[in-house]
Image (cartoon, grey):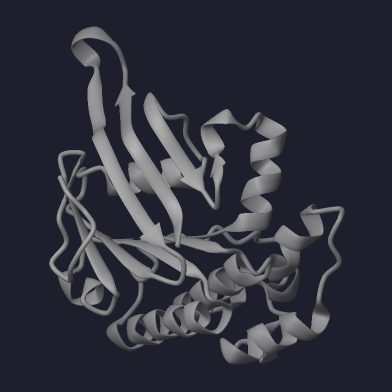
Amino acid sequence: MAIVIIRNLSKNYGKGENEVKALKHVNLEINQGEFVALLGISGSGKSTLLHMIGGLDVVTEGEVMIDGHNIAKLNRKELAIFRRRKIGFVFQNYSLMPVLNVYDNVALPVSFDKSRHIDHAYMERLLKDLKIWDKRMKYPSELSGGQQQRAAIARALSNKPALILADEPTGNLDSKTTNDVIGLLKASGRQYNQTILMVTHNEVIAQNCDRIIRIEDGVLYENEKGGGLHA
């Protein structure tokens, strides 16, 4: 079953002579439980597409359906609630709150949602699986880059989201930590039947995924691991 359905999606920035077509009539489906790589060079439109899917930017044309909801039709409050409950974000720069310790950073998405209570047993298991339970009272400045990224992944998973969007999650990491992070994302996807879309420019990293989608100048091209996508 497709959890992400994109139809005729375009995104333009600027107007007139300064207009830039970042995405051009993109069509895409991603099934529940898939781990998909979005592969492209800098400026190809891959981060823009990720932001469209995550509701972080407004579409110019077309629709983005996430778990049966057209997010372009949601108002600001509805979209904020939808993102908190359905989508987990992992960014290259970690985006951890410097004034909060690891545990509170990870719990932040849950604490924002007044209708939900923090599942402390799940939080403990998550941090132990990511091997940062012993760092739970530390602040981001006291962690290594790899530990900060693990904390960022734990935060993305804390709400048990259906969809995880990862933007170059291993860009600042060494090769061993990169392998660990990819392994953790795959394990989480399998354990919680989550769908993962990971932006990367690294061909080797992309090969770890179930499917590779290539993007060039805002256009998607058929992936090399089979089926279902056309330019």
Q: Nearer the viewer, residue 226 or 217?
A: 226
Residue at 17% x, 49% y is 230
Outermost residue on the top side: it is: 16
Q: Nearer the viewer, residue 142 or 69?
A: 69
Quadrant (top left/top right/bottom left/bottom right) for the C terminus: top left
For residue 112, side relative to residue 148 (left or right): right
Quadrant (top left/top right/bottom left/bottom right) for the N terminus: bottom left
- Residue 14 lies, with reference to residue 159, above or below; the image says above
Residue 100 visible, this angle: no
For residue 63, side relative to residue 156 (left or right): left
How many marks the image carries: the answer is: 0
**Residue 65, position in %: x, y?**
48, 43
Q: Nearer the viewer, residue 179 or 192?
A: 192
Residue at 32% x, 23% y is 13
Question: In which quadrant of the rendered view does residue 113 lie?
Answer: bottom right
Residue at 23% x, 15% y is 18
**Residue 6, position in %: x, y?**
37, 43
- Residue 60 lies, with reference to residue 196, above or below; the image says above
Residue 72 visible, this angle: yes
For residue 38, side relative to residue 128 (left or right): left
Residue at 66% x, 31% y is 76
Question: In which quadrant of the rendered view does residue 119 lie?
Answer: bottom right
**Residue 213, position in %: x, y?**
22, 59
- Residue 35 lies, with reference to residue 73, above or below; the image says below
